[in-house]
Amino acid sequence: MNKFFNGNKKSNLKIFLTLVFLLFIYTILCMFSYVKAVSTDLSNSVFRLHVIANSNSNEDQLLKYKVRDSLLNYMNNICSNCKSKEDAINLVSCNLDNFKMVAENTIKNEGYDYNVNIEIGNFKFPTKHYGDISLPAGYYDALKVEIGRAEGRNWWCVMFPSLCFVDLNSGIVPEDSKEELKNVLSDEEFALISDNSNSTLKFKFKLLELFADKNLSIANN
């Protein structure tokens, strides 16, 4: 009789552990699916800017910001009527030589003769915060600008919607830029990147960062 009960206990324990394991796997798969869906929607909604300084010297870092400001001013002038990320990318593509000229002229006017490499592509970005909007790490379409040897610290931004057309000292994101994001994201997705007071959303954002980092590491191996 004892052997019978002991056998049932072991059998029940195995079933329980199997169910726990399957539940764990299901939860992980759901997390991956959620992260992939949100990351894809975010990546498909924004067009970013990546400026890399020649070096980390104070002079080169200041020059990087001068180039950034010139590029953003030019972008602001030509993209004011863009209604989608695709519009912005197409417009930048058609004016790529002009963007390069703007950067080169800024560098020359500041007394430097660095070369400029500029391209549109899909690049890895870390988690970045723009006022009350936060974008998780991931791969995003972007305009990348490399100054000189491009061995210095990076500067990251969002060209569309215009999250970086702000007073950089105030950290204020324009309301119309937020509206652009609201129009292309679900309510939860927008809340996820804009509401830092909700503990559930903060937890989901951390999951997004964690799984995005894992995916980035896998993609680079």
Image (cartoon, rainbow, N blue to C red):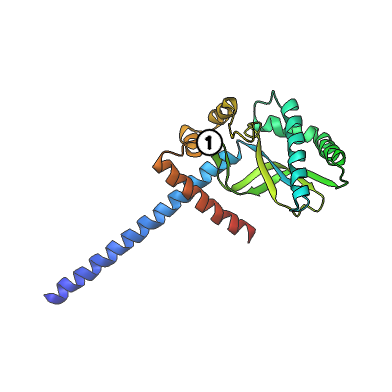
* Residue 155 in sight: yes
Image position of 98 (left or right of 209):
right
| Quarter of the figure that contains the C terminus | bottom right
Identity, as a three-letter code, of the amino acid under mark 1 = Asp
Q: Secondary structure at mark 1?
A: loop
Residue farthest bottom in this picture: 3
Residue farthest left in this picture: 1
Q: Is residue 7 above or below residue 207?
A: below
Q: Residue at x 48, y 50 (%)?
A: 32
Number of marks in the rendered image: 1
x, y percentage for residue 185?
A: 53, 33
Residue 9 location, quadrant: bottom left
Image position of 106 (left or right of 181):
right
Residue 81 location, quadrant: top right
| Quarter of the figure that contains the N terminus | bottom left
Image position of 72 (left or right of 12):
right
Image position of 199 (left or right of 47):
left
Q: Residue at x 18, y 73 (%)?
A: 6
* Residue 91 in sight: no
Residue farthest front in this picture: 58
User: Dot 1 corresponds to which residue?
Assistant: 132
Badge 1: how crowded within 10 Å, few (<14), some, or many (20+)?
A: few
Residue 173 location, quadrant: top right
x, y percentage for residue 152?
A: 73, 53
x, y percentage for residue 46?
A: 62, 36
The residue lying toward the viewer, choosing from 22 and 150, is 150
x, y percentage for residue 103?
A: 81, 39
The residue lying toward the viewer, choosing from 42 and 158, is 158
